[in-house]
Amino acid sequence: MAANPDLDRRQRPRAAALLSAVVPGSGQVLNRQPARGVLFFLSALALVTASWWIGRWAGTGADVLFLMIVVLPWWAVQSYDAFLTAHAGSGSLPNTLSTLLDRGHDLRFLGALFLLTAFTDLYIIVANPAYSLTVFCAKPAGAFGVLAKAQSPTLHVLIGYGFLRLRPWAFLLYLAYAAFGVVNATANFACFGYGRVRTVFLITLIAFTVYILWRRKRFGASPPPPAL
């Protein structure tokens, strides 16, 4: 029985993306680009090694942060590159990045990170009932304390969903979230002085906000026509 070329054209991009998601560069090898695949594999290996080294040097929180904002995005980029290359028959990293930005996949990735953070927050709250969130130098207790803790996963879920759908309201909600975070972190700095966690949080929040402001026009914009 002859193979169906149309079916192969539909299945190959998904197979290439899935392979690269499991083993970086393997989707490019499937697309008959072995040198490109080896480069992606070596770059991913170097980033994972760097994450491990950072964890040994600066502690577990640092390597997790590096993993989330550097390693995972690059992992997703090379998997998307395998998908696009399978569609077009050839490709380049600049074309992959351009298509990714045009379609807002970078913001969707941030949305996925917000959803992941929401589950992490919820786990911390459930596993540590005595945990109290510091709000403007105070640790509220009772009903107000429960509401203060609940707002974090709730906002992360809303922002994450909105970013995945590129909703304009998600951009505005994020700005309110970021403004509160910066003011609260600054107040806690004034009360308690330097703290590694709050310092990393503040720097990361500012960096994310600058990037999201730069990408603000992508929210609510009509999707571009297919590039392939």
Image: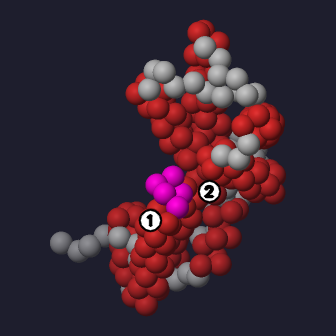
Q: Please state the horizontal and vertical placement of residue 104, each as a whole percent of the image.
A: 67, 55
Q: Please state the horizontal and vertical placement of residue 90, each as a whole percent of the image.
A: 52, 83
Q: Residue furthest top?
A: 143
Q: Is residue 13 depicted above or below 203 in this figure?
A: below
Residue at the image position 49 percent from the left and 66 percent from the top: 57
Is residue 113 inside the magenta stretch? no
* Quadrant of the drawing holding the C terminus: bottom right
Residue at the image position 58 percent from the left and 53 percent from the top: 109
Q: Earlier in the sequence, mark 1 or mark 2?
A: 1
Residue marked by disc 1: 56
Q: Secondary structure at mark 2?
A: helix
Q: Is residue 216 depicted above or below 48 in this figure?
A: above
**Span colored in magenta:** 58-63
Q: Specify the color scheme.
A: secondary structure
Name the side, left or right, on which 173 lies relative to 100: right
Mark 1 residue crowding within 10 angstroms, few (<14) / some (14–19) / many (20+): few
Relative depth, front residue between 182 and 75: 182
Q: Is residue 209 visible?
A: yes
Q: Is residue 76 visible?
A: no
Q: Residue furthest left?
A: 1
Residue at the image position 65 percent from the left and 22 percent from the top: 139
Given the image, on which type of amino acid does mark 1 rest? Answer: Arg
* Quadrant of the drawing holding the N terminus: bottom left
Cα–Cα span, label 1 and label 2: 32 Å
Q: Quadrant of residue 95?
A: bottom right
Residue marked by disc 2: 105
Relative depth, front residue between 174 and 143: 143
Residue at the image position 44 percent from the left and 65 percent from the top: 56
Q: Secondary structure at mark 1?
A: helix
Q: Please state the horizontal and vertical placement of residue 62, each as a whole percent of the image.
A: 54, 57
Given the image, on which type of amino acid does mark 2 rest? Answer: His
Mark 2 residue crowding within 10 angstroms, few (<14) / some (14–19) / many (20+): many
